[in-house]
Amino acid sequence: MDIGIFVRKIGMTHIFDENGANIPVTLVRAENCQISQIKTTETDGYSAIQVAYGQPKSNKISKPILGHLEKSGSEKFRFFGEFAVNDPTQYNLAEFIDLQSFEIGQNVKVTGKSIGKGFAGNQKRHNFSRGPMTHGSKNHRLPGSIGAGSTPSRVYPGKKMAGQLGFKQVTIQSSTILYIDKNERILALKGSLPGKEKNILKITKKV
């Protein structure tokens, strides 16, 4: 199988290489992934493989999703994702994806949601410097002027201000697989990965 896989983040630890260097790694466990739809240029306008993953918390699944899953088997899944492929004809509907095609030392791309940190000010969100703390200053952590005067009498779009920090899609362009346990479906990837424990991550092979 030449496409990626969806995994769930376990946490971080460290391992030692053959030279004794301490390397931080993130442990992830592969989800049960099954091909639920094969998209082609003729039918959908682009070539991709849709993968179903994640066991539902209960049997309460909507009828449209149940009807969609019946095409690929009787398994029940909660989420869906896609992987772009050049030749979708080499894949089979209802085929399960495992870790057999992954190797130690392989570079992969990892995508996931970063940790949400709530509403944050300019200093924390954009690393702005604060105002003076002495000599009667009352501007310590205030944003300051945000407008541009009577012309154009508005705030330009994209102005860096206080707002939601984190909980955005983040992509690690290159992470290396340092350990694989195919029986327990566990991967160890070099460095930190987006999100906290139990976060779903999308691993894509780098061509």
Image (cartoon, helix red, strand yellow):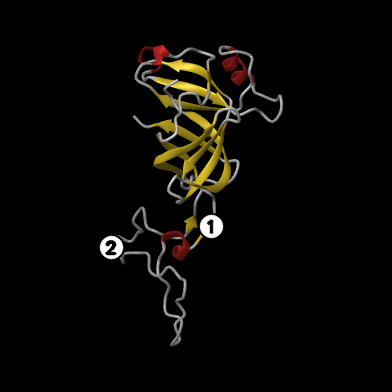
Task: Rate crowding at label 2 as few (under 14), some (14 to 19) or many (20 or more) other CA atoms within 10 Å.
Answer: few
Q: Quadrant of the N terminus?
A: top left
Q: Position of residue 94 (x, y in %)?
A: 54, 14
Say which of 192 and 166 sits in front: 192
* Residue at point 54%, 54% (across, down): 117
- Residue 122 image-quadrant placement: bottom left
Q: CA distance from mark 2 to mark 1?
A: 30 Å
Say which of 11 and 177 sits in front: 177
* Residue at point 52%, 31% (across, down): 6
- Residue of label 2: 151
Say which of 172 and 159 sits in front: 172
Residue farthest along the left direction in this orientation:
151
Q: Position of residue 151 (x, y in %)?
A: 28, 63
Q: Are marks 2 and 1 in contact (CB under 8 Å)?
A: no
User: How many numbered marks have been drawn onto this rendered protein structure?
Assistant: 2
Q: Quadrant of the C terminus?
A: top left
In this view, 12 is above or below 144: above
Q: Tell me which numbered mark, 2 or 1, is placed earlier along the sequence.
A: 1
Amino acid at the residue labelled 2: Thr
* Residue at point 55%, 38% (across, down): 28
In this view, 104 is above or below 2: below
Q: In what element is the residue under mark 2?
A: loop
Task: Rate crowding at label 1 as few (under 14), some (14 to 19) or many (20 or more) other CA atoms within 10 Å.
Answer: few
Q: Position of residue 184 (x, y in %)?
A: 60, 31
- Residue of label 1: 119
In this view, 26 is above or below 181: below
